[in-house]
Amino acid sequence: MKRISKTQQVEIHAAIDKLDLAGDELGSEIARYNSYLDGMKKAVQEKQEAYNEAARELRETYVEVAEEARSYYEDRSEKWQEGESGQRYSGWVDQLEVFDVEEIDIQFAGELERDGIMDAEQLELPPDSPDEV
């Protein structure tokens, strides 16, 4: 074979057209996916912030309860503090003071990119014959 035949050129151009169409469709789906992903990300971030705010409020409530309980404990007599009831109460206050609810930090997947999807104009086709090399 000295060169690519007319029939083969037609087949090559048909394949290029098919690649072009498939690339356009893939690009459209990537854009649609990214748009959907962006919308879902915003919805999840809103729910994440609501959760984290609730976690902060719960922690703050326990801080207030613990402060009140610690104050109650400290207002009691030394005899009561050293007794069984005082020791049990102090242990309970300790648990109130260390209670924690961690906030959620979600790592989101990135958007898809069109890297590598070639348009027909971007293709660098090999020459049709060895004479063109």
Image (cartoon, rainbow, N blue to C red):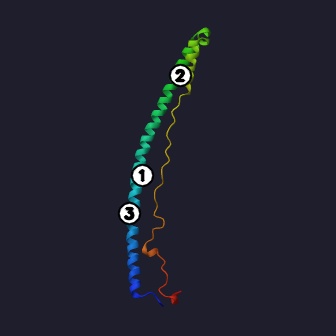
Question: Dividing the picture into quarters, in which one does residue 20 lie?
Answer: bottom left
Q: In the picture provided, is 49 more to the left or to the right than 72?
A: left
The residue shown at (43%, 48%) is: 41
Which sits earlier in the primary sequence, circle 1 or circle 3?
3
**Mark closer to the chain start, 2 or 1:** 1
Give amino acid for label 3.
Ser
Tell me the SS state at disc 3.
helix
Q: In this view, does 73 lie to the left or right of 111?
A: right
Q: Residue 61 carries which label?
A: none
Mark 1: few/some/many CA within 10 Å (<14, 14-19, 20+): some
The residue located at (38%, 78%) in the rendering is 14
Residue bearing mark 3: 28
Expressed as whole percent of the image width and height from the top left, the position of residue 95 reads: 55, 24
Could you tell me residue 16's position as x and y percent? 41, 76
Q: Is residue 112 above or below residue 88?
A: below
Amino acid of disc 1: Asp
- In the rendered image, residue 11, in percent from the top left (x then y), is placed at 39, 81
Helix, strand or loop status at disc 1: helix
Q: How far apart are marks 2 and 3 (CA)?
A: 56 Å
Disc 1 and disc 3: Cα gap in Å? 15 Å
Above or below residue 53? Residue 116 is below
The three-letter code of the residue at mark 2 reads: Ala
**Does dot 2 land on a helix, a strand or a loop?**
helix
Q: Distance from label 2 to label 1 (Cα)?
A: 41 Å
Q: Residue at x 46, y 56 (%)?
A: 111
Q: Mark 2 points at which residue?
A: 66
Q: Residue 38 carries which label?
A: 1
Quadrant in the rendering for residue 73: top right
Crowding around mark 2 (Cα neighbors within 10 Å: few <14, some 14 to 19, many 20+) is many
Number of numbered discs: 3
Q: Sequence-wise, which precedes: disc 2 or disc 3?
A: 3
Instruction: Name the residue rendered at 52%, 19% in the picture.
Output: 68
